[in-house]
Amino acid sequence: MQQCLVIGRTNVGKTAFVLNFAEYLGLSRVEITFNYPDGFATKQTFRLEHARQELIGQGQHKTRCLQALELNVPAGKTKKTILLTDSSGFSEGIPTDKSVRRAVAQTLLEIKQAALVLHMLDASGPGAVGEVDRQIANYADTRGGYVILANKMDLPQAREGLERIRGQFPKQLILPISALYKRGFKEVKAIVAIVFNHLLGAGSAFSVGWAIRLMDDALDQDVDLIWGKPNWSIRLGPGVTAYALFAFAIALVLDPATGLCLLTSAYAIGMLSETRVLPTKLPGYIEGTALWLAAAWRFGLPKAWVALGIMIAAQLIDDLLDRAQDQWLKSPNWTTKLGFVGTVLVCLALLAVLYSLDAWMLAYAIISFVYFQLQERVSKQ
């Protein structure tokens, strides 16, 4: 599960933001996982008002471990489950308390792992940006997925503080918020949705595209040699399978649902006419269908149906582009069954349905498909 990590100095409002953001998304109870620096972890369920009483305090370093809760962040017609993690606050200088030092070190390590880092600053104070904030910003910005939250905008001094923050970080995305009154949460939700639902989904679709391309090139090496088509299997040799597996692994890390649904859909379509018994002791078409059903069971039928539709559309477009080659090889091609115009119409109708179901996932696939078509044509020149 992808993580959104909230960091910042002590008493800037990190815990209040995490709990109130959960409430903003519709939760009245939260299950929080406390991950301590020594490796011990425990879970506890709170009503939100009780969580505020227990976890928010004015003293420094009230939070001494990572406190994570699961949230379903809506984006269009889909939702993405993420971990929103509160962290131990930073302070100027080195803490004298050993447990605080370990908690801060734990937070620094977690910055490398998080898909999105929300760096919270107190815009209301005269020292809105301290040296530790500049160091955190330099450290976090090197890994991407970094946004600054200027908190306590409900206080009168915060406007001046916001301008100071913008002056210190002119190239960063800065969102003014009030964690206490949930102001600016709509914009935060939009950023979280873009990062987790769209950027990671697009990266996963692109990586799956590479995995499929490499595996197809391994199967089509001899035919591509005859037709003079670019082929990665010829360039990479026996290592092409390893690269395909690596691309698929990246897809699973970025967005498991998108990656697995797209790949199993491609495999199911590729095996549709395969009646030979494979090493699993199943005919190819049954094995492909079983894998697609497993992905549908794990990630839901809506996601799996859209992925299957995308791969069918990609197959139709491929058949339109390769109809001359397939005709010469006597390979199956939808244009021989539906005709050129019929194939185009079916493809357009399918794309319209997919757009209504999940426009973002369709967009990822179209961008990846166009990229690979352009890459193939550039390689020919």
Image: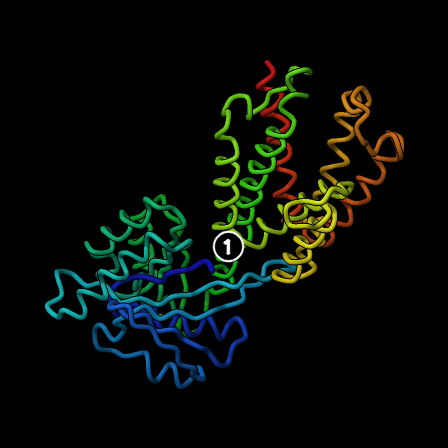
Q: Residue beneath label 1, please?
A: 196
Question: SS class of the residue under badge 1?
Answer: helix
**Residue 72 sits in which quadrant?**
bottom right
How far across and how far down the image is residue 354, in percent?
73, 49
Q: Residues within 10 Å of mark 1 (few under 14, many from 20)?
A: many
Of 112 and 162, nearer the camera is 112
Residue at figure coordinates x 51%, y 21% from the top left: 235
How far across and how far down the image is residue 61, in percent?
22, 72
The quadrant of the image that shows the C terminus is top right
Residue at figure coordinates x 42%, y 84% from the top left: 49
Q: Is residue 313 toward the left or the right of residue 83 in the image?
A: right
Residue at figure coordinates x 78%, y 29% from the top left: 320
Q: Is residue 324 toward the left or the right of residue 52 in the image?
A: right
What amino acid is labelled 1 in the image?
Phe
Q: Single out the residue that lies furthest toward the left.
A: 96
**Residue 55 sits in which quadrant?**
bottom left
The total of numbered circles placed on residues is: 1
| As drawn, 219 above or below 294 | above
Of 312 and 188, nearer the camera is 312
Q: Is residue 224 toward the left or the right of residue 326 in the image?
A: left
How far across and how far down the image is residue 251, in percent?
52, 46
Of 283 and 290, nearer the camera is 283
Colour setup of the view: rainbow
How far across and how far down the image is residue 340, in percent?
86, 29
| As drawn, 186 above or below 272 | below
